[in-house]
Image (cartoon, rainbow, N blue to C red):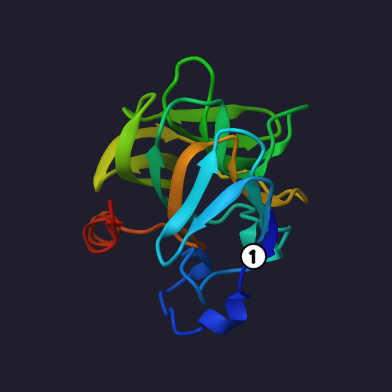
């Protein structure tokens, strides 16, 4: 299955400060992206991934690069079972690359928010394990720290030098995931604790 998602230019009504990308996966909404492989669109709801080769290719837009500025990556995820996968990824640590991701590594089998600057890898582990219900995951770079939040609560924070993580890789959603993804947002600033909690409470997807 290959299908175009609707351009962000049709979603100007979403007026959140610093929101540079938004994929709602509802009909008539979203940023640019192409569905590749076996991905099911649940109408008006979310995308379902089968744990194999399906994903969304969102291209390489400069607005998705985060040189040294603060930023936030936000997503709703439901896991049907562990698979080594990237929920959101922009760049790769392979060959000491630069970028950021929310991913599901092989060991331990927990969700992580990761930043890598070409010389060092900064992983932040969540409490989300192999299978979990709909959960709100937020990764934040805020000044000299990076943070990961789950369901409105901060789970980990570590020190981080403000080095550039810009790269020329495409942004991908759902590569290898066995589960559902909804409401992907990227901001070019750090959301406050109150904003993160508000987004969690107002955006819980349907079962």
Q: Name the foreground residue: 74 vs 57.
A: 57
Mark 1 highlights which residue? Answer: 63
| Residue 136: % across, % down | 33, 48
- Residue at left 21%, top 58%? 201
> Would you identify the image quadrant in which residue 80 lies?
top left
- Residue at left 46%, top 25%? 82
| Residue 173: % across, % down | 58, 48
Q: Name the foreground residue: 57 vs 150.
A: 57
Q: Does dot 1 land on a helix, a strand or a loop?
A: helix
Looking at the image, residue 172 lies above or below residue 183: above
Q: Name the foreground residue: 123 vs 205.
A: 205
126 relative position to 95: left or right: left
Q: Name the foreground residue: 52 vs 122.
A: 52
109 relative position to 83: left or right: left
- The mark total stands at 1
| Residue 41: % across, % down | 52, 57
- Residue at left 32%, top 33%? 132
């Amino acid at each position: 299955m290959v299908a175009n998602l609707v351009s962000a230019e049709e979603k100007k009504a979403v007026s959140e400060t610093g929101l540079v990308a938004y994929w709602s996966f509802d009909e008539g909404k979203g940023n640019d992206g192409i569905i590749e492989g076996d991905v099911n669109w649940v109408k008006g709801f979310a995308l379902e991934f089968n744990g194999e080769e399906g994903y969304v290719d969102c291209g390489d837009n400069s607005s998705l690069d985060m040189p040294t500025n603060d930023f936030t990556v936000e997503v709703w995820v439901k896991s049907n079972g562990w698979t080594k996968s990237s929920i959101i990824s922009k760049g790769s640590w392979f060959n000491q690359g630069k970028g950021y991701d929310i991913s599901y590594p092989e060991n331990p089998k927990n969700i992580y928010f990761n930043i890598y600057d070409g010389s060092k890898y900064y992983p932040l582990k969540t409490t989300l394990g192999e299978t979990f219900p709909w959960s709100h995951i937020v990764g934040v770079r805020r000044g000299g720290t990076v943070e990961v939040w789950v369901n409105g609560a901060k789970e980990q924070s570590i020190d981080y030098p403000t080095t550039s993580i810009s790269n020329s890789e495409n942004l991908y959603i759902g590569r290898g995931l066995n589960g559902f993804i909804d409401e992907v947002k990227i901001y070019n600033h750090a959301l406050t604790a109150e904003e993160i909690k508000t987004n969690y409470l107002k955006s819980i997807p349907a079962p």
